[in-house]
Amino acid sequence: MAAAKAHYFHNSTWSSTISCYEVAASNPNRIWKSGPILEDEGQFLCVQIAYAVFTSNILYYIIKPFHQPRIIAEILAGLTLSPLFLGRTVIGKTLLAPRLLLNIETYANIGLMCYVLLSGLEMNLDTILRIRRKAVSIAVAGIIVPVAIGVGLFAMLRHFYENSAAETHFREDKKYIVEAYLFWSLALIITGFPILARVLTDLKLLNTKLGRITLTAAMISDAYGWFLFVILIPFAGNDTRPVLSVLTTLLFILICLFAVRPIITRYIHYKTDTDSWENSQLVTTVLLGAIVCSYITDALGTHAIVGAFVYGLILPNGKFADLVMGKVDDCASGLISSLFFFRSGLTVNLVTVAQQKYWPLMALVIVLLFIPKVLSTLITTFFFNIPARDGLGIGLLLNTKGVLALIILDIAWDRKILSVLYFTIMVSAVFLMTIVAPIFISAMYHPRRRFEMYKLRTVQKLRLETELRILACVHNVRQAASMVSVLKNCNATRISPMHVFGVRLVEFRGRAAATLFAAHIEQPSTLTGSPSMAGSSQNESENITNAFNVLTEWNHAVRVETTDAMSVYETIHDDVYCLAQQKLTSIVLLPFHKQADVEGGLETTNAIYKDINLNVLQNPPCSVAVFVDRGIGTSSSRNNTSILTLFVGGPDDREALAVTWRMAGQPGTEVSVVRIVLYGEAADVSVDSESQWISSAIMDEERHKLLDDEYLDSFRLKVVHNNDYVTYSEEDVGSADELTSLMQEFAKDDYDLIIVGQGNNRNSALFSNLLQWCDNQELGVLGDIVASDNFGSQSSLLVVQQYDSIMENGAQTRQPAHSPANSDSSQAPLV
């Protein structure tokens, strides 16, 4: 075994002689027969780990803008120790000294075990069983066509190299010819499901139809890959009874699923429900069980990682899974398993292979290996009337590889099934496929390019008899319930229906996001929460869905869909943009980062929510409203909902009035519209340089006054004169003190909801000066006053920002085409 491992790394480090390990048995009568490894070589292992982690993090920082997954950086870190870089230097020779390579091998396999353990913990078999025909067809075609083409390419390579003058270590073992074809093909058909999910998340395509179809097909491909892996491995080793090995392994899996799982689930649920887990106890339960199962499957002749995967699969989902992810994921994914991919980079022998006679053929084959998945997807999507561009995009994404492909190739080389040549070709192809896919997809489906096709969407320009489409973003159940209270007042009728898209904003937490999205991937009308998340989070997901579904029960003119937007919080606003564009919404509702406390004030829920709101308000594809909840409908003693709308002027205020116009039609709703007329110094136009440029180029003050008067006159004629529950009045304001006094008078009336415009385009010097003193500038001056605890009111608040105002403010660099909205035909683009 020691000699075999030394030869294994001889090919990767290109040493001039084959080194063998010499391990002395210091005490043969004890369990540990070797010397003190940690004492003698522990410091060198720490240096190797530090180099791998440090280098991969630096490289990941460089390639991250190109939407590359972390696995690419970890493999590149291994390639830095190749002869092209540091392999022949003192650093390379020190880190890859023959006596130290066994330590890397051992540590990498421990990391691999942890990685597949978490993969099994994340997987949800129920999702796979309910997949629809379209995704299944794409996945199956992505297996059949690559196998056929891959076998042909492998046969072509063997035809050129088997009789060539290449060195013997470039030829595979003749007794494993059939296995070589199988391993070559199996590595080609597999798609890395967790890695693909991260790529789609970074590209902001996870919530699109393209993302759903691609991720579903990848999940099926990954599941088939694991099944074929279990079947194939015993036939690829030295086991004289491979059939018995397969049967006993399958029996072990069935025992784990139907006998061990109920017992361990009962115990874990008891410990979880009573919150009696200790950190050491939790980690021991997970890792010890994985080691035991790994030992069993290894003894049965399959592979140790099968046991770790099965153990992760039988562990209960919910709160326990989230606890495990929180304790193990960062360490396992960022520190332990990274060395496996680092070692995979060490094994690639590009220099030696490139010196061979037929190196152009090798390069051609690497390029041709991109084709099978793309060709199979194009053929399949053609029969489902999916546009060719989307078929090409799905095919490129399905070329994304993951850990299972590297494991298969690693085993094939270790057991001499694939020679160095064929191994290097396939590893290089796997590496390049994963790199190329995000780059091409980013160019094909650039978010800004998609927004350019999006027609201008505002509530003001939407006819009253047209369906109102609203994207309601929430973080928890309480916010969902408050959003529902607002949406109930939007007066949905059969003539003017309403379509609500409830979106739960979920922070991307590494590997768990893949399963979080996939748990209900084929159920667009339900929240895509995952059973693998925490129990409280799972219940919250269900409660959010139930909260939004109340709208359909309350009014049949309302349609509801719920989904998740998953990303790191710094970029989750891009997911909101994509969803708003995809769903053709007229307005996005955002929850304020503070909520009402027991004393009637506002306390911060999560400070990061404010940053999310600010990012969404920066450059959205439609209007946006921020909702400050103080218990709408509970603050007033009146039976009917009372609404106050304050109108100063500008596009934001016109949009706020448009929202009020919708709500005014709700039976029993009392609406008061107050126009604040500025005079004297308060009416002076702001004279700073930026305002002068805006005023001269885009925001002519007189034009806005004309638009304000025209829209107010229309509102008074069509609503105020025909509805006794709607009143209109005007108040003069000449200074900041008069504005403060007026707002205090409004606070005494105790309205259920106050609606104001954000006020981006107000040129008033009064509001420009007051804005500098606002604690929450995303609410504007009036909104910040109402949200202040000093305001003394328990009224909820809705602050509206119109899409037009952003365009005219110059913050938006693009000019959206006024083209018709995308149709819902089968030939429509998927994003």
Image (cartoon, grey):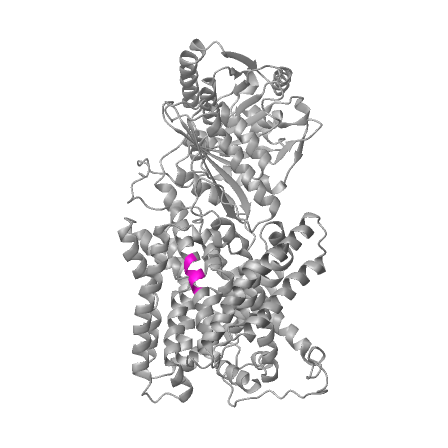
Q: Is residue 62 above or below residue 689?
A: below
* Count of labels in the image: 0
Please give left or right for residue 569 compared with residue 281 in the image: left
**Residue placed at 45% from the left, 65% from the top?**
227
What residue is drawn where x is 30% and y is 82%? Answer: 160
Q: Residue at x 30, y 69 (%)?
A: 149
- What percent of the width, then of the height, locates residue 760? 50, 30
Q: Which x, y percent locates residue 83?
A: 49, 80
Q: How far from the left and from the top, in percent, is residue 176?
A: 40, 81
Residue 171 is at least partly visible in this image:
no
Q: Main secondary structure of the magenta part?
A: helix
For the N terminus, the quadrant is bottom right
Quadrant in the rendering for residue 218 = bottom left
| Camera-side residue of 620 and 751 | 751
Give the magenta range: 220-225
How far across and how far down the image is residue 197, in percent? 47, 55
Inspect the magenta stretch and tell me whether residue 222 lies in it: yes
Left or right position of 708 against 144: right
Asked whether residue 544 is drawn in magenta, I would say no
Residue occupying image coordinates x 44% and y 20% = 708
Camera-nearest residue between 278 and 816: 278
